[in-house]
Image (cartoon, grey):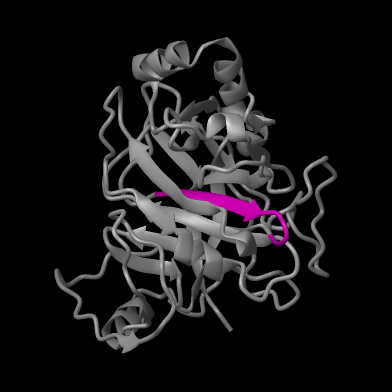
């Protein structure tokens, strides 16, 4: 089942304090106020969300049900990213080739991150809820993907590429390897963000991958724009990444439909705390405005040496379900 709107117009949020930083939607650092609000929990209980089984087609039915839609999306097999023993099941060349899609499985690696609705965390970030990806944007359903920088697309991105010149423009376009693996309908594989010193000059503030929904379709309000990502072992401990941002757009507008979701350097550092293997995260939002382009951006400090593989993007989830954490 997908989360339902609370009947009342206003939900009072009674927070307990916490010291854990969270992702945020404005680009301004926000200190954590840890959920779960008592009144929100009651509302979720009344909506049938707490402790329920996820409905894997975004509405109702069995895992993996549903087929390709006319919105560029298709169902996700919930079991194909990680084996029951917690081992990635992918067979690609990436250092991490799987993504755990059942946060209630005690054998699975931890998946944290942040999913917002408007400005409120609704999954991850200490909410006691995990997110199960049930549908994703897929090439077989008409979705496409492109590499960019600085949140630009279309003519403005072309202008940036022209200003960079031949080698730098080529480096930029090659900086997301296997990009089609982010829209192949499986969590076993992933595109690979590679950061090199040549990209991190004054002209490039972020490295982007956009997922585009085929015209004239769009993902409607009430659905999701959530990227399932992972980071190589130990990378976040180095403190080299400054932010990961997710934004949605409609048509040719360069203005995001809603405030971008941002995991800043502090939140990224905490994601990797105490972990010896890859770090997994979901980043995005339950949208209140339709979109036909979702962009994930990675920013890093200017370095004297190459970072190499920095982030893997497994899928961009267009629908999902919450599960209560044990």
In this image, 313 relative to 8: left or right? right
In this image, 165 relative to 305: left or right? left
Q: Quadrant of the C terminus?
A: bottom right
Q: Tell me where residue 37 appears, x and y as whole percent.
A: 31, 83
**Snapshot quadrant of residue 168:** top right
Q: Can residue 101 be seen in this view?
A: no
Q: Is residue 134 above or below residue 195?
A: below
Q: Nearer the viewer, residue 22 or 131?
A: 22
Q: Tell me where residue 266 appears, x and y as whole percent.
A: 46, 66
Residue at horizontal 38 percent and vertical 27 percent from the top:
152
Residue at horizontal 52 percent and vertical 49 percent from the top:
227
Q: Main secondary structure of the magenta part?
A: strand
Q: Is residue 279 above or below residue 36?
A: above
Q: What stretch is highlighted in magenta?
A: 224-234
Q: Tell me where residue 250 appears, x and y as whole percent.
A: 30, 31
Q: Tell me where residue 23 appears, x and y as whole percent.
A: 40, 62
Q: Is residue 326 visible?
A: yes
**Snapshot quadrant of residue 163:** top left
Q: Which of 149 and 292 is in front in this view?
A: 149
Number of marks: 0
Which residue is farthest front?
304
- Is 230 within the magenta? yes
- Is 225 within the magenta? yes
Q: Which of 272 and 82 is in front in this view?
A: 272
Residue at horizontal 55 percent and vertical 17 percent from the top:
169
In this image, 149 relative to 306: left or right? left
Residue at horizontal 42 percent and vertical 38 percent from the top:
294
């Amino acid at each position: 089942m997908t989360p339902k709107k609370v009947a009342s117009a206003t939900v009072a949020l009674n927070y307990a304090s916490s010291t854990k930083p969270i992702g945020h939607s404005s680009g301004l650092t926000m200190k954590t106020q840890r959920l779960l609000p008592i009144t929100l929990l009651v509302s979720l209980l009344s909506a049938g969300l707490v402790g329920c089984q996820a409905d894997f087609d975004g509405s109702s039915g069995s895992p993996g049900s549903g087929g390709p839609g006319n919105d560029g999306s298709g169902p996700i097999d919930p079991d194909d990213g990680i084996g029951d023993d917690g081992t990635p099941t992918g067979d690609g060349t990436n250092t991490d080739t799987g993504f755990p899609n059942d946060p209630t499985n005690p054998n699975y690696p931890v998946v944290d991150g942040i999913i917002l609705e408007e400005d409120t965390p609704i999954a991850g970030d200490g909410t006691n809820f995990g997110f199960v990806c049930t549908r994703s944007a897929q090439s077989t359903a008409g979705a496409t993907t492109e590499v960019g920088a600085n949140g630009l697309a279309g003519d403005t991105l072309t202008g940036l590429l022209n200003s960079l010149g031949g080698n730098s423009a080529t480096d930029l376009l090659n900086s997301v390897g296997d990009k089609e693996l982010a829209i192949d309908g499986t969590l076993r594989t992933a595109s690979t963000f590679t950061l090199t010193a040549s990209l991190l000059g004054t002209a490039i503030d972020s490295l982007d991958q956009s997922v585009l929904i085929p015209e004239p379709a769009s993902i409607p309000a009430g659905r999701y724009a959530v990227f399932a990502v992972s980071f190589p072992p130990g990378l976040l401990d180095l403190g080299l990444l400054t932010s990961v941002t997710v934004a949605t757009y409609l048509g040719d507008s360069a203005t995001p439909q809603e405030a971008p979701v941002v995991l800043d350097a502090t939140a990224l550092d905490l994601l990797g705390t105490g972990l010896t293997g890859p770090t997994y995260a979901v980043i995005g939002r339950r949208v209140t405005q339709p979109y036909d382009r979702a962009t994930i951006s990675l920013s890093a400090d200017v370095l004297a040496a190459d970072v190499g593989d920095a982030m893997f993007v497994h899928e961009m989830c267009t629908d999902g379900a919450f599960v209560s954490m044990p």
